[in-house]
Amino acid sequence: MRQPQDAETFGNATGQVRLLLDADETGGAVSTLEVTMAPGADGAAPHFHTKSSELFYVADGELQVLAGDEIITVGAGGSLVVPRLMPHAFGATPDTSARILIALMPGVERFEYFRLLDRISKGEATFEALLAAQEEFDNHFVDAPNWWAERNARRR
């Protein structure tokens, strides 16, 4: 169990992450976090997981998601499961912020991954460290030019 005031939170005006429960706290069943993004903010670059499927639940706003070769929009109250091995990415739609719950099932220890992302954003770690940790965090980056073309075409 995690009370709201006990969740580790970091980020900036563009995006925030609240770490809810990691795999070691759920017997490996799930890893969960909440992500809040400003309008048009990118959430995650294209990647896939080999061990877990990923559930996205949109609590507020609209989420644009790459799921395989499709780019879809999921509105508030909607959800989507991306099966393991499927390339995916996400971000808030250009005109709307988004607040989402993400759950990896089964759980994989992921909180250190998000702490590393935070250190990279502060200049305390390099992107090379993230690339070196792909296997450890089961987060494997892929090239998805259609995703970036769509995201960049709709930016203001």
Image (cartoon, helix red, strand yellow):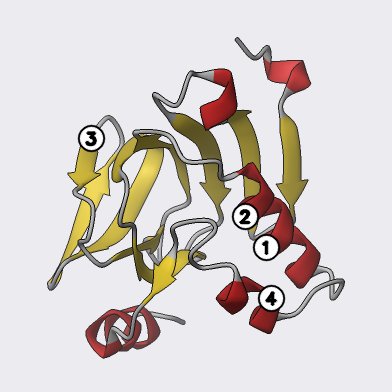
Which residue is under mark 2?
A: 113
Give amino acid for label 3: Gly
Which residue is under mark 3?
A: 78
Which residue is under mark 1?
A: 117
Determine the residue positioned at 27% across, 60% down. Answer: 65
Determine the residue positioned at 39% across, 43% down. Answer: 61
Kindly indicate the quadrant of the structure image that contains residue 117: bottom right
User: Is disc 1 in contact with disc 3, using a CB cutoff of under 8 Å?
Assistant: no
Spot occupied by residue 93 in the image (x, y as percentages of width and height)? 37, 61
Q: How crowded is mark 2: few (under 14 residues within 10 Å), some or many (20 or more)?
A: some
Q: How far apart are marks 3 and 2 (CA)?
A: 26 Å
Q: Distance between the residues labelled 3 and 4?
A: 34 Å
Q: How far apart are marks 1 and 3 (CA)?
A: 27 Å
Q: In this view, does 99 lie above or below 2?
A: below
Q: Is residue 42 above or below residue 79?
A: below
Q: Nearer the viewer, mark 1 or mark 4?
A: 4
Number of numbered tags placed on the structure image: 4
User: Is disc 1 in contact with disc 2, using a CB cutoff of under 8 Å?
Assistant: yes
Helix, strand, or loop for circle 3? loop
Which mark, residue 129?
4
